[in-house]
Image (cartoon, grey):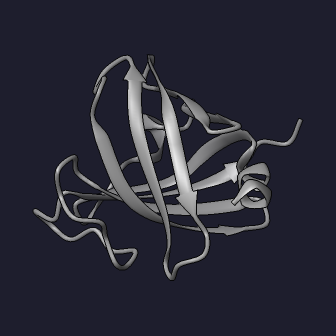
Amino acid sequence: VEDELKLFEATWRFVAIEAEGTPVPEDLFQEDRLILKGKQFTSSVRGNTTQGVYKIDPTVTPKTIDITFTEGPGKDNSQKGIYELKGDTQKICFAAPGKPRPTDFTSKPKSGRIVQVLERVKP
């Protein structure tokens, strides 16, 4: 787990987002960033900053991720998800708070799921 966490440590930019089966227009997230350090995250989305903690389990298939918001919009909410991490690209599928963990990387209408694709920002 510790080795996998080190692979996450970076600033990431969103390259694609699909919410409940609908692609989100790129101009709505092109300035957004996600910073991962240790087990903490800071997300800047549409001018709103949120912070929290995350934990991963790379030993299961698909690999799982759980996030808990500690500051900002959504404070004290948690989400369950799955992820793929390949080189400088990560793909995450999250369920809405209180919904069961996704088992695949799909986001159908009324599913409460969001699929995000992010790329590592080069220093």
Residue at position x 32%, y 48% from top? 79
Q: Position of residue 54 (x, y in %)?
A: 51, 43
Q: Position of residue 40 (x, y in %)?
A: 60, 33
Residue farthest to the bottom? Answer: 61
Tally of numbered discs:
0
Residue at position x 39%, y 37% from top? 68
Asked if residue 34 is positioned above or below residue 61 in the image, the reply reads: above
Q: Position of residue 24 (x, y in %)?
A: 35, 50
Residue farthest to the left? Answer: 110
Asked if residue 80 is positioned above or below residue 35 in the image, the reply reads: below
Picture quarter containing residue 77? top left
Q: Position of residue 13 (x, y in %)?
A: 63, 42
**Residue 28 in the figure: left or right of residue 59:** left
Residue at position x 37%, y 79% from top? 104
Asked if residue 116 is positioned above or below residue 28 in the image, the reply reads: below
**Residue 7 in the figure: left or right of residue 46:** right
Asked if residue 119 is positioned above or below residue 38 in the image, the reply reads: below
Q: For the N terminus, which image quadrant?
A: bottom right
**Residue 25 in the figure: left or right of residue 26:** left
Q: For the C terminus, which image quadrant?
A: top right
